[in-house]
Structures are given as C-alpha cells and as structure tokens.
Image: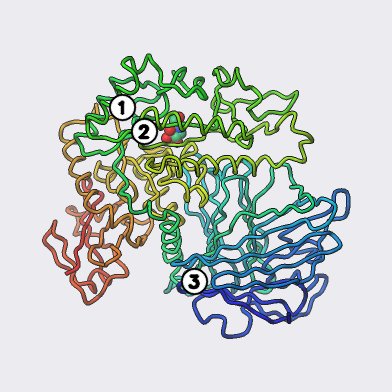
Amino acid sequence: MTPHQRWTLRTEHTGYTVRLSPDGPWAELHAWGPHGVENGPPALDWSHRTHFVTPADAAPAEYVPHGLRPFAGADLVAARPGAERGVWWSFEDVREEPGTLRLTFTDAVLGLRTTLCYATVPGTDVLHRWTELTCTGEEELRLERLDSAAVNIPVTAAARLTYLSGQWSQEFQHTRLDLARGTFAIGSTQGVPGHAYAPWLAVQDASAPHDAPAPAYGIALEWPGNWHITAQAEPGGAVRVRAGRVPHEGAVHLAPGDTLTTPRLACAFSPDGLDGLSRVWHRYERRLAGERLHRPRKVLYNSWEATGFDVDADSQLELAKAAADLGAELFVVDDGWFTGRADDAGGLGDWHPDPAAFPHGFDRFADDVRALGLDLGLWIEPEAVSPGSRLYAEHPEWVYRIEGRPARRVRNQLLLDLGRPDVQDFVLATLDRLLTAHAVDYLKWDMNRPPTERGRPGAGPADRLDLDAEHVHGYLRVLDHLRTAHPHVTVEGCAGGGGRIEHATLARTDVVWPSDNTAPLDRLRVQYGFLHAHAPHVMSSWVTDAPGVFDPRPRSLAFRFVTAMCGVLGIGADLRAWTPEQRAEAAGWITRYKEVRDVVHLGDARLLGSPEDATCGVQYDAPDGRRTVVAAFSTGPLDGAPLVPGRPARLRLRGLDPTAAYRDAATATTYSGAHLLHYGLPCAWSAGHDADLVVLTRR
Ligand code: DGJ
C-alpha cells in the first residue's frame, strides 16, 4: 500500500475521496463535494512545515488517535488500564467494494485494531461513517474517547456553523455562528439527545458570496444517548468536525477479542446551501422509512391539551365524536388512561386501564371509538416508574440508583434501567399485552425524565459499566420488536416534546413529536428549524388553542391549520369549546389536507424565507412535478393598506419550470413558472388573513 493511494465513494451527486497520507499512517480527506471534485490536488493540501506541532496535528485526518495526534484533538483515546494513553498504529489493509470502504490500522503494542468504515446510502447524497475497534491483545483496553468519525471542511476566513438549539418547549431553534478560530461544542449527557441541541450540524464557508447559496456540509449522529459534536476552526483555513457518543462512566472497557462498533455518523453535502442540504436529509429520512413511507399518515386527534390527566370514557368519546365529525382518522388517548394516574405523581409502570375512568371496560371504549370510524392510539412512557406504583414496590432494583444516595425525582418519577434484559422483557411483555388485548393501532412512546443518579447497584465496579449504551440498546431492541411483532402499529417518538429525535429513532418510528409548544408563531419557528434536519413525513403537528409562550401574538385558525399541515396533521384543541363556525372551517382544512398530504410527505420541500421575515412559507413539489403546494404565512407586519397604498407580499417559489403554466384553481389564476420564480406568489395579507395553502397544478 502506498501513500497517496486514494479511494472515492460516490453518492447520487457527490463524491468523497479519501487517501492514505504521505505524512504518516493515517487516512485523510482528499476531496468531498460534487462529482468530479476529486480531480485536482487535495482540498486541504498544506505546506508541510510545522512548528511546535506534528504533521498529524495539521493534516485533514479522517480519524486519528491520541498518540499520533498529540495536540490538536484526537478522535480516539485508548490505553491499557493504568498505562499511558496513546495509540501509535500502522496501516494494515483496505477493503473496497462498490459503495463501501474499510481502512484498517493496527497498534500491535497496545493490541488494538481500528477499522474506519464508509458506506454510501443508495438513492441519497448521504455517506455513513463509523469505526470498529477490536482489542487484539491479551489485556483489556480503556477507551476514553471513541468518536465515530471526523470530517474536514475547507473554509476561507471562518466557518459558518448552523445548529439547532433550544430548551423544552423551544426545540429546534435555527441558530448560526461564524467560527474563525477556536472550538465549538454541543452535546448531551441526559441519556437522550436532549432539548438543548439536536445531534446535527451544518458547515458552510462564511466568506461565500452572498448572491448564491453557500455549499453546505452536514452531519448527523445516529445515537439516542449521550453524544457530542465538536467543530474546531484550525489554522490555515480548515474546520475539523468530530462526533461520537459519550460514555456515562467516562470510558468504555474493551475486553480481549471484543469489538466495539461506534454509532454511525451520516455525512451529507449539497451545493445548494442549507435549503438544498435539508432536501438531502429529507430524502435520506424517506429512505429510512422504507415501505412504511407509503402508508398515509392519518389525521390524528390527541386529547392531552383538552383533558390533561382528567381522562374518562365520556369526555374522550365526546372529543372523539367531535374529531370524527371534522374528518379525523385516529384518536389518541394521551397520559392519564391507566390506574393511579390522577396527576403526574403516580401510576407510571402500572399499565392497566383505569376501571374508574372506563367503567364499561377499556375494550368497550375502544369499540366505541372504532364505531366512530377512528383508529385508536395510546400514550405510554415505558421507561418511567412512579415511586408509589406496584411495579416499583415489586422491583425497586429496576430503577437507576446509586447505593447510599437519595434518588432524585424528576416530574415525580424515576427511570427504569432499560439496559437490564429483565426490564426490557417487562417492557416488551407490557407492550405486547396492550397492543394485542386492546387492538391498539398507534402508540405514542414518551420519555419525560433524564437519568440523574445513574448507577446499577450490585453490578460490579461502576466504572466497568456502559449504562448509556446499554439503555440505548434496550430502547432500540424494544422499538425493533414493535416493528416485527406489531407491524400494523404506527409508532410516534416523543420525549417531553423533541428530546429524543435522531436517526436511530427515526428509522424505527413513523412520526416524532418535535415540541410540546403548539402555539402558532412559536411552532412556526420550531418547525422551520426542524425541517432543516428532518423530513415533513415525520413531523407531527397539532392544531390547538395554545397561546404563544415566546411569541404571544394571536394568529388565525387558518394559520394554525396551515402550520400543522406542513407535516403530519393532528388536532389537539378542546373541540368541545369550538363554535360551529370553527368546526366547519376545521373540517374544510382537513379535507384539503387529505388532498395534498401525499405531496407534503413524498414531495421535495423548499423553505421559503424564514419566520424572521414578514412573509415566509414552505413549498412542496410532487415527485412528478404536477402539483406544487405552498404553505404561506404572515408573521405579523402588513403593508399598511388600505390606509396607505399597499401591495400584496410576494413569496418567490423555487425549482419550478419557468416555461410551464401553474394554475391555482381556488383563485382561478394561472401563473407562468417564470412569474412565480421571478416575482413570486402574491399573498394579500390582512389582520384576519395570515396564512394560506395554495395548490398549483402544472398544466
Ligand atoms: C410530554 C409530551 O410531550 C406531551 O405531548 C404529553 O404526552 C405529556 N408528556 C404527557 O405527560
């Protein structure tokens, strides 16, 4: 094997070329971008002069251990227990097959084999990267850092980083910073990806010209546990992004003969800026859904915001009847249906319908819901347990705790150690029972507290455990079981809003709940960020009566509907209080949604402007280009008419055929593609007219 030898992985429109470094035993980036980008010198070629650092510190290394790269940040930190940290490996071999590449490096002294793995995802512009670490010696190894991969991106003066940040009720806020030098880090130690940051990052050159979208590189880590993403702006115009899981105990022990496979890092590129990058992620997530993508996502009614914990058959049936009259297709009973759940202080773990709430039995209730023509869904929080529950009395040892330390309660509850096989078996049996005994079609899986005192008494030395990974494997095992044992059940992923949304979850669920905030302008912002990383067909969204928390300006019912129709429409309002006029309007919107949901879920989505603009929207083009659906929003400011001369706002569409004609049947208007691209779709907003759904048919 000679230095400079290189390998190219090709996706639909991009190429990723790796080479063996001429400077040392590591792989480094040659080029990543549109097809053909590899024909030229290495994108991050450098002077090969170093002062105070080593060549590995300056190289655009794909994955390099501490030892070889002592100063600038390593992707792997390994040692024998009690010995000095460091790996000094040499290149062993390469295995290349169509769409995959494996580069192996070995450190015979330490007894570690490391394989850098690459695989393209067919039909997308996404490449998976991960690393396999095998202990080949006779002594175990301690892995303090075990990243999945690093990516290197050339920038001129600074890197423009876009990330999705927030908190509970304000997830997925689109946030940006320019990093000229230094380190940027995001992550979670909450045992789930968390509300604060999505495990997702986009990188662009901050100096790109303003009149064209700057090519965008993106990464997303497939790991529903603790994680980090770090971006380092290095000298000489390079940004190096590293990502991986973060063990709860600070290190993972690798026994002789064992192999640890890191989570996959999905790497994406688009020449068309963040908007183009979002479509790369959407297409990828449609692929994750497999054949389930083509099951229409039903219009849901969820009773949480209407009844809270006050669940009983009569109130639920009253809501179900009202929802069915509007055209809803599915009724979900949220938290509060099981014994001991008068409020958030009890009941979790004892997953039996409350006989007081369902005096004629839950099955009779289920039949009554079905008689309305609705599917039935149930909320559950399988990882949670209330301290007063029977489950906790019988199995106090199933809860995370540290011997001799008090167990804190978060939302009055404790967390089951889902890494334990007996806990997994309990959860599997509970779900099997509920889903078969009551003919449930839809399951909303919630999770409302992070692990605090995370320990497993009696399981040996605490620093030998890998509780975060075990919990993740338990969670994924149960989700996989749902897919195989109950394939007809639609699964919604939720963690106190959007606390656990990443690709391992998205590959095993049908929809996810991005945020508990359903207020119109707040939700618009959540969804704007969400759609940069995730596809419309997974974005559950409800029409409710909620007032704004962060932006309390009132918006119309139409605004709430059009916002929720940008993803998977649901209703969460207390329909009992709605007027006949509101119900009639809602029924009209639901009918329209059913007509266009295939375009929204299967088409190409384009984000038009942002909620910071007075007018913004989302454009969805059907895969065959025959229909374009535009969700348009007025975020507040108007043009002043009729007091002063005013003109309708214009929303410039993108990606249309300029020579084609597009007909809006609702207003009997025909536009040329050129007009819609150049001037835009007119939106004549007024105080009462603040959102619209326009359907354009190509002629
Ligand atoms: C948090 C979820 O995000 C809500 O939608 C709701 O299901 C509550 N939990 C119920 O406790």
Q: Residue 361: horizontal and vertical position, in percent?
A: 34, 18
Q: Does the residue labelled 1 lie within 8 Å of ligand 1?
A: no
Residue closest to the eye, 499 or 169: 499
Secondary element at tag 2: loop
Amino acid type at image mark 2: Val
Figure quadrant, ligand 1: top left
Chain-order first, disc 2 or disc 3 = 3
Residue 318: image quadrant is: top left
Q: Residue 238: horizontal and vertical position, in percent?
A: 64, 71
* Badge 2 vs badge 3, beta-carbon distance below 8 Å: no
- Estimate the spatial distance between the alpha carbons at disc 2 and disc 3, rounded to whole Å: 40 Å
Secondary element at tag 3: loop
- Estimate the spatial distance between the alpha carbons at disc 1 and disc 3, rounded to whole Å: 47 Å
At horizontal 63% and vertical 28% (from top left) the residue drawn is 399
At horizontal 19% and vertical 40% (from top left) the residue drawn is 587
In the rendered structure, find residue 366 and report the number of the disc placed on it.
1
At horizontal 54% and vertical 18% (from top left) the residue drawn is 389
Residue 615: image quadrant is: bottom left
What residue does disc 2 label?
440
- Estimate the spatial distance between the alpha carbons at disc 1 and disc 2, rounded to whole Å: 8 Å
Secondary element at tag 1: helix
In the rendered structure, find residue 11 and report the number of the disc placed on it.
3
Chain-order first, disc 1 or disc 3 = 3
Residue 123: image quadrant is: bottom left
Q: How crowded is mark 2: few (under 14 residues within 10 Å), some or many (20 or more)?
A: some
Amino acid type at image mark 1: Ala
* Badge 1 vs badge 2, beta-carbon distance below 8 Å: yes
Q: Residue 346: horizontal and vertical position, in percent?
A: 51, 20
Q: Looking at the image, can residue 184 be seen?
A: no
* Badge 1 vs badge 3, beta-carbon distance below 8 Å: no
At horizontal 82% and vertical 54% (from top left) the residue drawn is 79
Q: Residue 554: horizontal and vertical position, in percent?
A: 30, 40
